[in-house]
Image: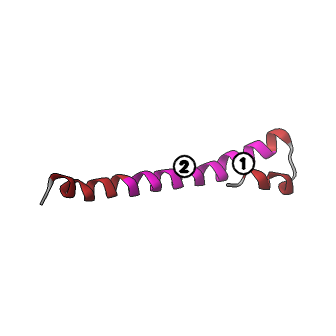
Amino acid sequence: MSEAEQHKPLKLALLLGSSWAINQLDYAMTQVCLPLIQEYYDVPESQTQWLQI
């Protein structure tokens, strides 16, 4: 087995881990930050749709 092949599982794990972390962060942003932004700017729900990615 070549060295590049040995690192494949590790790279995959890092990739999955980072995408999971990004998903968690994204979820936290929508759960915590959007309501705060809405409250702060007093924005109606319909106008915050563009903030959703």
Specify whether 48 is left or right of 21: right
Specify whether 27 is left or right of 7: right
Q: Which disc number belongs to residue 34?
A: 1
Q: CA distance from mark 2 to mark 1?
A: 13 Å
Q: Does 9 sit above or below residue 39? A: below
Looking at the picture, tell me which residue is in the foreground, 49 or 43: 49
The span shown in magenta is 15-38
47 within the magenta span: no
Residue 39 position, x and y percent, is 80, 44
Could you say which quadrant of the image residue 17 lies in? bottom left
Q: Residue at x 33, y 58 (%)?
A: 12
Looking at the picture, tell me which residue is in the foreground, 50 or 37: 50
Could you say which quadrant of the image residue 10 lies in? bottom left
Looking at the picture, tell me which residue is in the foreground, 33 or 10: 10
Disc 2 or 1, which lies upstream in sequence? 2
Mark 1 nearby-residue class (10 Å; few <14, some 14–19, many ≥20): some
- The residue under label 2 is 25
Q: Residue at x 65, y 53 (%)?
A: 31
Q: Residue at x 14, y 56 (%)?
A: 2
Residue type for callout 1: Leu
Q: Residue at x 74, y 50 (%)?
A: 51
Quadrant location of the C terminus in the rendered image: bottom right
Quadrant location of the N terminus in the rendered image: bottom left
Mark 2 nearby-residue class (10 Å; few <14, some 14–19, many ≥20): few
Element class at badge 1: helix
Element class at badge 2: helix
Specify whether 5 is left or right of 41: left
Residue type for callout 2: Leu
